[in-house]
Image (cartoon, grey):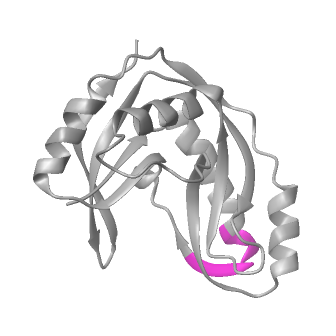
Amino acid sequence: MRTFIALDLPKEIIKEIQGIQKILKQKSLFTGKFTESENLHLTLKFFGEIDETKVEEVKKRLSEIKMDGFYCEIGEVGVFTKSFIKIIWIKLNGKGIFNLQKEIDEKLSGLLEPEERFMSHLTIARVKHVSSKKDLLDYLKSIKPKKSKFYCNRFYLKKSELKPEGPVYEYLAEYKLD
């Protein structure tokens, strides 16, 4: 079973991201696929394929996390590798995100590998071809999202099924933060 842990986004944040995606579509600086609104999320930890027994142990360990909710804020728009652009993302800021991610790694220690280089981001597009890297990078730098904040008081264990039309996510468990 292909699984991951994620934070979902409130509707007003999704609307803001849709606005950024719309601007990028109108600019036609690259070809690719934009993340569907219902699939926008922040991945805290990606497991890939794990068996059902491990999923049950993950559920049990995640239920032991005791942490307060926290605020997140939309950050800049960017890419991972400027020389080979494959993903366009929006950064999500907030110390609580990193604290939760660290807590998840600690709880899953010995069961799954810790995250090596966690970067808090929302994938908004997957890039196939870029006409001009410089133009795209300059334009992404010029985008200044509203510094919208939202409160995060839960996270989820999800299953991902890859289909030709795109991934389909299913909730396996919900975890509330105090």
Magenta residues, start to end = 25-32
User: Which residue is drawn at the image coordinates 70% and 81% (left, top)?
Assistant: 84
Position above or below: 167 against 37? below
The answer to whether any part of residue 10 appears in the image is no
Report x, y in % for residue 17: 61, 49
Q: Is residue 36 left or right of residue 55?
A: right
Relative to 65, residue 125 above or below: below
Residue 37 colored magenta?
no
Give x and y (percent) for residue 33. 52, 74
- Indicate the quadrant where residue 163 lies: bottom left
The answer to which of 86 and 81 lies nearer the viewer is 81
Residue at the far front in the pictured view: 110
Q: Is residue 86 above or below residue 114?
A: below
The residue closer to the viewer here, 99 or 163, is: 99
Residue 55, visible in the rendered structure: yes
Q: Is residue 17 left or right of residue 3?
A: right
Q: Give the residue at x 43% y 48%.
A: 45
Q: Is residue 9 above or below residue 43?
A: above
